[in-house]
Image: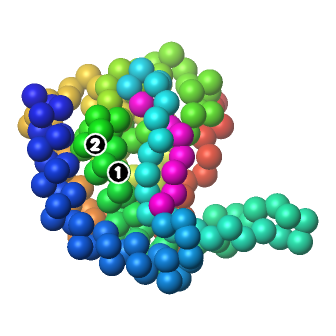
Amino acid sequence: MKRAIDLICSIILIIFFSPLMMIISISILISMGSPILFKQERPGLHGKPFYIYKFRTMIEKRDSSGKMLPGKERLTKTGVFLRKFSLDELPQLYNVFRGELSLVGPRPLLMEYLALYTEEQARRHEVKPGITGWAQVNGRNAISWEEKFKYDLWYVDNQSTWVDIKIIFLTVKKVVIKEGVSSKAHYSMDRYRGAE
């Protein structure tokens, strides 16, 4: 049933947001050039890798030695706007359509984190990852990694259609009031370095 809901909703949302995604694509092309999309390998259900898609929010800017500058120095004004309203996540509706993501589930993190998880933390991969999740509506980037994993595991143990509906409702609410996007002007969280 969850897959059927994901499929139907992703088709409806892709159609509904297609004009907006076209506008965003043109804006990125004008302000940052190509490519329009950011693609990165992430772990899915049971850790199986897949490629996640987002609208690009950063430029490739390097220092004099050729080293990539920190994200906060590469984030563009267009990128800040897209992250502020979570519009950079819209291409992930295609991941949902393809069955790699669900609308709701633990957010897919980096492949390199797999080796850093404790046995308990690794349980977050027992369900399909999602565009939004219980951790996202309980602080998102404003909470610690330990708290994030605690919320992810709560979802694994308590997932249901009604929980998913609640999370989607809370996600829309938080996007509208722009709560918890980031504690540092919409920059990403610090990298996870393993349990202490």
Question: Going 64% across and 64% down the picture, which residue do you hit?
Answer: 71
Label 1's element? helix
Question: Which residue is nearer to you in this view: 25 or 137?
Answer: 25
- Badge 2 is on which residue? 96
- Look at the numbered disc 2 and give the secondary structure of its residue: helix
Residue 190 spot, x, y in % from top left:
60, 51
Horizontal and vertical percent position of residue 10: 19, 49
Q: Is residue 189 above or below residue 158?
A: below
Q: Residues within 10 Å of mark 1 (few under 14, many from 20)?
A: many
Quadrant (top left, top right, bottom left, bottom right) of the N terminus: top left
Image mark for residue 92: 1
Which residue reaches farthest right?
65
Question: How many marks do you count on the picture?
Answer: 2
Asked if one can make out residue 113 in the rendered structure from this viewpoint, the answer is: yes
In the image, residue 133 lies in the stretch drawn in magenta: no
Where are the magenta residues, as a range? 37-44
Badge 2: how crowded within 10 Å, few (<14), some, or many (20+)? many
Q: Quadrant of the C terminus?
A: top right
* Residue 154 visible: no
CB atoms of marks 2 and 1 within 8 Å: yes
Give how far apart the Cα atoms at labels 2 and 1 are: 6 Å
Instruction: Identify the residue at image location x=49%, y=77%.
Output: 29
> As shown in the figure, which amino acid type bears the numbered disc 1?
Gln
- Where in the figure is residue 65, as x and y percent of width and height? 90, 65
Q: Is residue 114 left or right of residue 78?
A: right
**Picture colour scheme:** rainbow
Q: Toward which corner of the image does residue 128 lie, by quadrant?
A: top left
- The rendered magenta stretch, by its main secondary structure, is classed as strand
Q: Position of residue 86 (x, y in %)?
A: 35, 64
